[in-house]
Image (cartoon, helix red, strand yellow):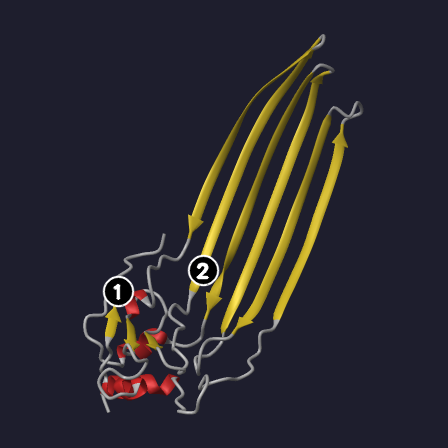
Amino acid sequence: LAPISAVEVAVSVYDDNAGANYQVNKDQAQSSNQFDVRADQYFGSNQKFLLWGRYTWKNQSSINPEPLLVPASTGTGNSRVLKVSANYTITPNLINEFSYGFTRDQSGNVNSFDGKSFTDGLGLNGLQNLFYNGLSELDFSSSLSNLSADRLNSVSQSNTYDYYDTLSWTRGRHQMKFGVDVQTLQSVTPLGFSGADNYGTFSFASSNDCGLFTGVDFADLLLGLPNQTFYDVVSQDN
């Protein structure tokens, strides 16, 4: 039994019965909480100044099952939206409006399983820059269930900030507007190319859907003899 394979089997299940070898019902609970607040107010005896705003808060969470015996991940989706606007009537035919707003979104998965320490214990040579939590991928062409959790921790963020000011001038039958709109965009997304990327992808198969070396793909795994491997190095996320 290859030492690397002995550890990998700890998160896999083998059964040579026909059909998918591992089937189980897993919790996939989801929850969502949200509230919205809106307010507006005129100021001054002549009500020349109007201030209004709106704020939206939303949190979502879910339990996302992972393959085989890998613990489930916790999915999150958080959103914050703010819009504030101030309108000032300088004269009946001259109005200025200023507004500010932002949209902040964050989503992704986190997992309690320490994939980096697990992978370090396998003794694989040449793995580089394991800066994120993940697992090597094991693929079988037979009915065996694949170990394809890959990236266990993955968070995306998107932030948009908007500054807007406009001056409206009405003269006779003509209306003109002058203004400026400035937006700031920020984004963070996980970067990946194929399979488990930095953790490596190992395939056990042959043209006849059986082990290339022993005739049984799982036996090839136990011997540490994949018929194909894939590896790429992600230096950092976007």
Label located before the other in sequence (1 or 2):
1
Quadrant position of the N terminus in the picture: bottom left
Tag shown at residue 161: none
Q: Residues within 10 Å of mark 2 (few under 14, many from 20)?
A: some
Q: Is residue 56 above or below residue 165?
A: below
Q: Nearer the viewer, residue 206 or 119?
A: 206
Q: Is residue 107 left or right of residue 188?
A: right
Q: Residue at x 27, y 57 (%)?
A: 235
Q: What percent of the width, then of the height, locates residue 127?
A: 23, 70
Q: Residue at x 44, y 81 (%)?
A: 68
- The amino acid marked with disc number 1 is Asn
- The amino acid marked with disc number 2 is Val
- Residue 7 visible in this rendered orientation of the protein: no
Inter-mark Cα distance, 1 to 2: 18 Å
Q: Is residue 120 left or right of residue 42?
A: left
Q: Nearer the viewer, residue 5 or 132?
A: 5
Q: Nearer the viewer, residue 138 or 31?
A: 138
Identify residue for label 2.
155
- Residue 8 visible in this rendered orientation of the protein: yes
Q: Is residue 100 above or below residue 210?
A: above
SS at mark 2 in the image: strand
Q: What percent of the width, then of the height, locates residue 236?
A: 31, 56
Count of numbered badges drawn on the protein: 2
Write down the quadrant of residue 10 in the picture: bottom left
Identify residue for label 1.
129
Q: Residue at x 56, y 22 (%)?
A: 179
Q: What percent of the width, then of the height, locates residue 96?
A: 64, 22
